[in-house]
Amino acid sequence: MAMINWWDVLPDSERQQWSLDPFVAVGPLRFGVSPDEVSMALSGITTESQRHTLHQPALDAVSMVVEGSYPKFGLKLYYREERLAAVVVDALHGPQVVADDMPLVGRVPSTLEQWMIDRAEGREPHGELTYLDAGVPGSEALGVVIDVQRAGDHLLTRPVFVPLEAMDDLSHWLPREAWSLC
C-alpha cells in the first residue's frame, strides 16, 4: 500500500484548469448561487459531496457564515445568507485558477506578489493592489486575496476569491478560520 504524503503538491497538469471572471465566477462557480447550485455545478467534476459547517460569529460585526468543503478536491466555500460569498482553493491539490494568463494556485508567494505589483503599475493607483493584516497581498481589481498554505517547509499560494461587495470589509466578510494557514 502506498503511503500518503500530506505535503505533496499536485502538478498543474493533474489539476482542473479554471479561469477567473473577477467578482462573477471562479471556474464553474458563480458568486451568489445557493449551496445546491454549487453542488450541481461540481457534480460532473468531482464525486465528493459538499460538507457543511456553521461558523457562529463571536462579534456582531461578522455575519453568520456557512462553510462548504470538498476536502479531497481542494475547495472551501463560504456562504452568507445561503449564497456563495467566497471560494478558497487549496494550494496542494485544488483546481488551478488562472487570471490574465497567470496561474494563482500553489505558487511561490513572492513571485505572485511581484506579478500583482507589476500588474498594478500603469493602472489607476487606487483600486488594484492592497495588503491585509500580516502583509497578505490582494487585488481589488481581481477580487482575490493571496493567502498562503504550508507545503512541508515551504509556503504556497492559497487564493481566496470574493465578490465585489466583500472588498469594502474583507476582515469581517469571512470567519477568522478562512484566513488561517492549513
Image (cartoon, grey):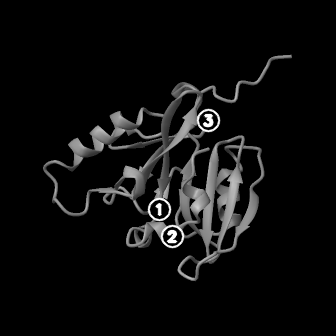
Q: Is residue 105 left or right of residue 142?
A: right
Residue located at (69% from left, 73% from top): 56
Q: Position of residue 62 (x, y in %)?
A: 56, 76
Report the residue marked by disc 3: 93
In the depicted view, which residue is nearer to us: 179 or 115?
A: 179
Q: Secondary structure at mark 3?
A: loop
- Disc 1 marks a residue whose amino acid type is Val
* Quarter holding residue 13: top right
Return the residue nearer the eye: 115 or 19.
Answer: 115
Mark 2 and mark 1 residues within 8 Å of each other at the beta carbon? yes
The local crowd at label 1, few if under 14, some if 14 to 19, many if 20 or more residues have their Cα within 10 Å, is: many
Compared with residue 143, is residue 113 higher up or lower down, i.e. above or below?
A: above
Q: Secondary structure at mark 1?
A: loop
Q: Which residue is mark 1?
A: 162
Mark nearer the N terminus (2 vs 1): 1
Q: Quadrant of the C terminus?
A: top right
Q: Position of residue 73 (x, y in %)?
A: 67, 42
Which badge, 1 or 3, is on the more N-terminal residue? 3
Q: Residue furthest top?
A: 1
- Which element type, helix, strand or loop, lies under badge 2? helix
Identify residue type, mark 3: His
Let me know if residue 104 appears in the view.
yes
Name the residue carrying label 2.
Answer: 173
Examine the rendering and report whether any part of residue 136 can be seen.
Answer: no
Disc 2 residue type (three-letter): Trp
